[in-house]
Amino acid sequence: MLKKILIANRGEIAVRVIRTAREMGIATVAVYSELDRHALHVRLADEAYALGGETAAQSYLNTEAILDVIRKSGADALHPGYGFFSENADFAQAITDMGVAFIGPPPAAIVEMGDKVSSRRAALRGGAPIVPGTTDFVHSAAEITDFGNSTGWPIAIKAAFGGGGRGMKVVKDATAVQDAMDSAKRESKAFFGRDEIYVERYLTWPRHIEVQLVGDKHGNVVWVSSRDCSAQRRHQKLIEEAPAPGLPDGVEQAMGEAAVKAARAVGYYNAGTVEFIYENGDFYFLEMNTRLQVEHPVTEIITGIDLVEWQIRVADGERLPMTQEQINALRHGHGIEVRINAENPAGGKFLPSPGTISTLKVPDGFGVRFDGGYESGDTVSQYYDNLIGKLIVWGKDRPTAIARTIRALEEMRVEGVHTTIPADLAILRHPDFAAVQHSTKWVEEKLDLSGIAAHIAASVPPTEGLVEKTTTVEVNGKRFAVRVWVPESGGTAPMARRTARTSAAASSSISSGDVVAPMQGTIVKILVTVGQEVNAGDAVIVLEAMKMENQLQADKAGTIKAINVKIGDKVGAGDVLVVIA
């Protein structure tokens, strides 16, 4: 059995792996950036090592720094989580070459399936239908325009080495191609370290249905459950369900079998997910994610299978513990997973909301689970993904699961940052969702979120009367927790209170001629020049926060009087970026 696992990730997924490894008697090693020095995954691991830097590129995407920690810690296995290096074949090969077990698929399978273009070829080889699109990378706006003109608009520009909607841009006509292509490449490079793209037809009202599978090194592959992930914004999932509801008889089984065939076509083992687009009774292979998915717990809650444990056992050379028939017999009831993201959903904008979580109280009760990466007092950084945690709920049937999820969300308290909870409740309460009439476009095109107000409860209670203190020190890059006793008068100062500007305040500022940053972020593009005439609604600045690009628009017509930032500048919520006279 493996003895020590290094988790090359952060947040909720690092915590998730640490907990399963601990239950299996396996020691864990965390790595962290400067901003994550006191993060929950660091506090829970048996050992923790500094990577240095703040951004992902400087820390969690620093190959040499991670390899150095493997050598220092003596870890004999590495779990990549999701995002970062989880679908990087070169990284997986480097780990394997060190004689360290990579808790993921073989590098060759990552190459073929991790690249969305070659995975489409593999799906065809395995007999799965694909969405019409390119089977090669595209390199120019002209290629994309030609594709759109020949197949019809809209089309989707997608990151070839990405997932989760990162680096995906929907283009409605040829005039928007160049900007969309540039934005897709920037986002893909920032989040996945690569910027290759491809294009495919964008379906009009599809559902997003995927199949969780696991394979071992002995040639066995099984599919564990289907999941519906159609409740999305910006092509990123908000709510997932297992099993996928409302499918005609035989469709789920056909998807499962197609997923297994696609995996076998590339010699796949460990956990993976095959994503399909479903519309009007037909399904098409979309892509394969060669890693554990964010939404894997909703499969676990209807089967009782710990997928992380299976990953670890498969990586150690064990056979799958169950046959397909045994897994089929395990599925029972209905599961719903809600992603709690640090975003402001007011007006359906879903603007990133980094900041310090002053209060985090999670719900409890029968059939309720919460997988989180933060606790009260922790900070959600603008440099990383904005997932605070995941609420996973089980019910004996879908109506029960929906009602229980609503109850649990109503009990949950998150203060200090905006969250997607108000939007999640609006989705779950809507008759379209209950009737399974929603699609991947439903949240943005049909769901009315105009009644959601921008509000942050941001009070942070001071810590008083405490004499036992815990701090951390680093010795040669390795983190140690130290507990000390100090006089009560020498206690830690109260946390600074943080006041966030509301959207109403920002709107008032914009209408007076100031384009104001609605959140912390980095300026990646300036679309105007001083003296230029603009109309209300014209995009003037592109601000990146939490790996998402956000276009900030003029709220009135006028002339650009001043531009207070330049590309690469870091800005805070409320900063005046552009002045319109």
Image (spheres, grey):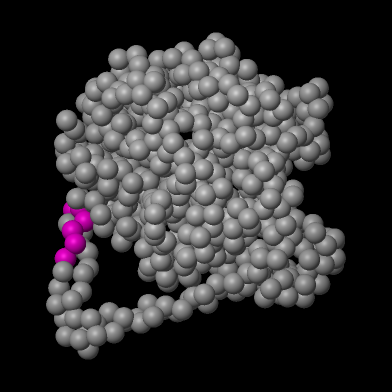
- Using the rendered view, name the quadrant where residue 2 is placed: top left
- Using the rendered view, name the quadrant where residue 244 is placed: top right
- From where the camera sits, is residue 256 visible? yes
489 with respect to 261 (left or right): left
| Secondary structure mostly taken by the magenta-highlighted segment of the chain | strand
Q: Nearer the viewer, residue 145 or 274?
A: 274
Residue at (34%, 35%) from the top-left corner?
Answer: 305
Residue at (41%, 62%) from the top-left corner?
Answer: 362
414 versus 3 height, above or below? below
Q: Nearer the viewer, residue 235 or 209?
A: 209
Report x, y in % for residue 92: 35, 28
Magenta extent: 476-482
360 versus 36 height, above or below? below
Residue at (49%, 41%) from the top-left corner?
Answer: 334
Report x, y in % for residue 352: 57, 58
- Furthest toward the bottom, the residue is 489
